[in-house]
Image (tube, grey):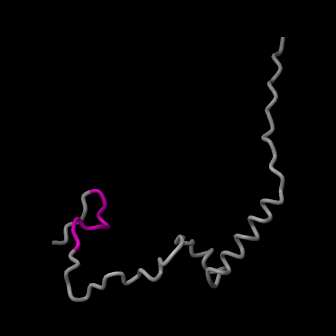
Amino acid sequence: MNVPHPEDPDIMLEYDFSGPNVVRGKYAKYFVKGRTVILDEDNANRFPDSKAVNDALRALTQLADAIPAQKPKRRSRAKASA
């Protein structure tokens, strides 16, 4: 029965996975190990594969680690006028 979820009409209350075309673990190979991160389209177009993403992130973290952390500047109190 295809009844939309009352709080989210994009999903159904129930799904039937008993059909002949159902394949268990069809996409499991994509989640073999590690984390899966979905990039926005504009970022995904810049990187051909996961190695390129990892190389760019390593370079960025090396740059960030090379910059000394700065303490936040304290705001001076406004002097009360007499």
- The quadrant the C terminus occupies is top right
Q: Residue furthest front?
A: 33
Q: Nearer the viewer, residue 33 or 70?
A: 33
* Residue ID at (79%, 59%): 65
The quarter of the picture where residue 41 lies is: bottom right
Point out residue 62 in the picture as x, y percentages from the top left corner.
78, 65
- The quadrant the N terminus occupies is bottom left
Is residue 80 rendered to the left or right of residue 8?
right
* Residue ID at (29%, 67%): 11
Magenta span contains residue 13: yes
Point out residue 59 in the picture as x, y percentages from the top left corner.
76, 70
Is residue 2 rendered to the left or right of residue 58?
left
Point out residue 8 in the picture as x, y percentages from the top left corner.
31, 60
Magenta span contains residue 72: no
Q: In this view, does 14 lie above or below 18?
A: above
Q: Give the range drawn in magenta.
A: 7-15
Q: Which of 81 and 9 is in front in this view?
A: 9
Q: Which residue lies furthest to the bottom in this view?
A: 20
Q: Which residue lies furthest to the left in this view?
A: 1
Point out residue 79 in the picture as x, y percentages from the top left corner.
83, 20
* Residue ID at (80%, 49%): 69
Q: Which of 44 and 28 is in front in this view?
A: 28
Q: Is residue 20 above or below residue 7?
A: below
Q: Is residue 46 above or below residue 71?
A: below
Is residue 2 rendered to the left or right of residue 54?
left
What secondary structure is the stretch in magenta mostly built from?
A: loop
- The count of marks equals 0
* Residue ID at (53%, 70%): 35
Is residue 30 rendered to the left or right of residue 9?
right
